């Protein structure tokens, strides 16, 4: 893996939620329709993906982020 690659591991439920969210958003935007709200569980799974992606990009959630070792 090169230093330019970011790898995220997703469980099946999270992968399905991410796919559905991206696909539905694109379809709704293309049709000019409102994007439906995700469920609480979907929101939590998508939030975790964004947190992990932030970390993969070298960002911290906040100055008090406890998900990464101190820099």
Image (tube, rainbow, N blue to C red):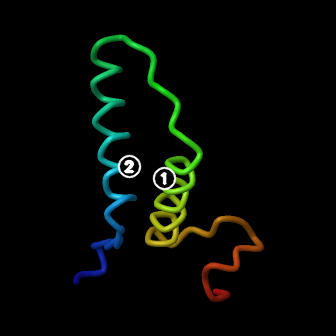
- Horizontal side, residue 37 vs residue 65: left or right: left
Against 66, residue 33 (above or below) is: above
Crowd class of label 2 (few under 14; some 14 to 19; many from 20; radius 10 Å): some
Q: Residue at x 33, y 40 (%)?
A: 22
Measured in 3D between alpha carbons, the distance from the residue under mark 2 to the one under mark 1, in whole angstroms, is 7 Å
- Horizontal side, residue 2 vs residue 55: left or right: left
Q: Nearer the viewer, residue 18 or 5?
A: 18
Against 29, residue 43 (above or below) is: below
- In x, y percent, where is residue 52? 49, 68
Instruction: Between label 2 and label 1, give the one nearer the viewer.
Output: 2
Q: Residue at x 27, y 24 (%)?
A: 27
Q: Quadrant of the C terminus?
A: bottom right
Furthest-top residue in this view: 32
Q: Quadrant of the N terminus?
A: bottom left
Q: Residue at x 51, y 71 (%)?
A: 55
Give the mark nearer the N terminus: 2 vs 1: 2
Crowd class of label 1 (few under 14; some 14 to 19; many from 20; radius 10 Å): some
Which residue has dot 1 on it? 46
- In x, y percent, where is residue 54? 51, 64
Cβ atoms under marks 2 and 1 closer than 8 Å: yes
Q: Secondary structure at mark 1?
A: helix
Q: Secondary structure at mark 2?
A: helix
Furthest-left residue in this view: 1
Question: In the picture, residue 62 is in which quadrant?
Answer: bottom right
Query: Mark number for residue 17?
Result: 2
- In x, y percent, where is residue 15? 32, 57
- In x, y percent, where is residue 38? 51, 37
- Horizontal side, residue 58 vs residue 33: left or right: right
């Amino acid at each position: 893996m090169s230093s330019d690659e970011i790898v995220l591991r997703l469980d099946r439920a999270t992968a399905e939620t991410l796919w559905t969210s991206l696909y539905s958003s694109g379809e709704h935007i293309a049709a000019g329709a409102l994007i439906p709200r995700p469920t609480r569980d979907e929101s939590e799974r998508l939030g975790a993906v964004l947190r992990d992606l932030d970390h993969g990009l070298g960002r911290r959630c906040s100055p008090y982020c406890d998900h990464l070792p101190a820099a």
